[in-house]
Amino acid sequence: MIESEKKYSNKDYRRLGDRIRQNPHHIADDDLLMLQSLRLSYKEPLSTIFKSVEKTAHKVDNNCICTYRVKRIESIISKLLRFPEMQVNRAEDIAGCRCIMSSVEKVYELYDRIMRNKDKLPFVIKGTIHDYIQHPKPSGYRSIHINAVLIDGDNRRIEIQLRALEHHNWATLVEITDLLFDTKLKEHGKEASNDLFEFHRLLSIPDEEIKKKQKYFIAETVIKYNYIETIGEVFARNYLDVRSRWNGLKLQRYPFFLVSTGSDGVPEFMGFMKFEEAESAYFNEFINNDENRNIVLTHLQEASFTKISIAYSNYFLTFNNAIINVLLYLSEAVVSAYRQHRVGLFKRYYHYFLSLLTFWIQKQMLEQDSFKKDRIAMNSLRIKTEWTNSIKHGVNVLSQITVNMHKKLKFDPLHVAPYIAMKRKQQEFRERYEEQQQQNADRQ
């Protein structure tokens, strides 16, 4: 157990930062203990500020998701190396809470309520408020950042993030890319991977502002990295196992959850009825976190597996709504190439789209088969309904994108060559689909 009450001076922390920067790959045990002590010291201000912000957020949006976390040791070290002048105990984001709202409008409603009632809150706002929704970062990141400290004189800053679910989905997709493609876009931006950085930046732009050339770039990047299938394989592998464990633990009845994930990408989670119980478990996991797992405490009202896995796709690795935008842009690149009579490009994009369609159908069939065999789901109306709706949503989204795309691929005397190519690809797709159906029937 770490003695979190031990006091360190500013000079102690300045020397700690110097030692870490001088030899970041061989940090002394005493320095690691000092970092852990610093992290633990944020418990009281983080708890107080989180409870206040979470209460306000749920008054604004019953579907909001509120979380808190303390930065991992390796993340603190990384930031010390990126910012040579930063003193570790004065970092503004060692501990933070986040409110994920259902829309941008709800984000600003919560922000306005905090600002109107700031004299009644147990914290005061310090420094500059950063509105990255109105003024996104170059990467495409969007959120509102507020720094707060307790009124009682504790100078530890807690970062409050307010973001819309669509912006959260984008941010978690960046983290998933970093994990599965071994990049560090979140930390190093373009230096990590110029094309994947640009790919994610374009995904952050509103659809009406995306140009044809940019849609082509998205399509090319998806094909180059086999992006959707690579992520989809991990999602499919995790999905059924994680959902089964969630249902088995009957976590739908809890409002507070502790979620953690390590380098293996396999999430662990626990449910709690009371915040105090969840907080105690969080810091117990926190203290004994030898594997340096990423741990988050979250609060959801009317929890469901679909809701928490979408909001925490970077932990659960089961689904991310931002993938739908990738598919949509790929379908629009298909249409653009067809209309511009770029036969080679059209065949390339259309073939890849159909291969993704085949891949997606396979995963949907596996999920439906598992759903029918899951006794817990079959015996619980709530779980059965929620899972059924999730399956229907997945089928409907893909079907809608496919149907809308084909409506735009009409025969035109000027488009004979791409039209013939399309018909050939469709025939190949039907033959593959029928073959898969027969193989599934033979296995049963």
Image (cartoon, grey):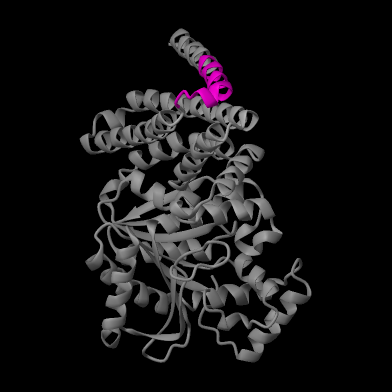
Rendered-image quadrant of the N terminus: bottom right
Whole-percent x and y of residue 357?
Answer: 49, 28
283 w.r.t. 429: above or below: below
Picture layout, residue 18 above or below residue 260: below
The residue sitting at the right extreme is 22
Quarter-of-image position of residue 198: bottom right
Magenta: main secondary structure equals helix
Q: Residue at x 55, y 54 (%)?
A: 202
Q: Is residue 389 visible?
A: yes
Q: Nearer the viewer, residue 137 or 348?
A: 348
Quadrant containing the C terminus in the rendered view? top left
Q: Is residue 425 magenta?
A: yes
Q: Is residue 79 left or right of residue 434?
A: right
Query: Residue 214's x, y, as percent?
Result: 57, 49
The quarter of the picture where residue 29 lies is bottom right
Residue 27 x %, y % = 73, 70
Does the rendering let one see residue 263?
Answer: no
**In the displayed structure, would residue 163 be above or below residue 388?**
below
Determine if the magenta segment contains residue 32. no
- Estimate the x, y position of residue 419 in percent, counting from the top left: 53, 22
Q: Decide if residue 348 is on the left or right side of residue 412.
A: right
Number of dots carrying numbers: 0
**Residue sitting at x 55%, y 87%:** 7
Camera-nearest residue between 341 and 430: 341
Q: Nearer the viewer, residue 259 or 354?
A: 354
**Residue at 32% across, 84% down:** 122
Residue range in magenta is: 410-427
| Front position in the image: 231 or 370 | 231
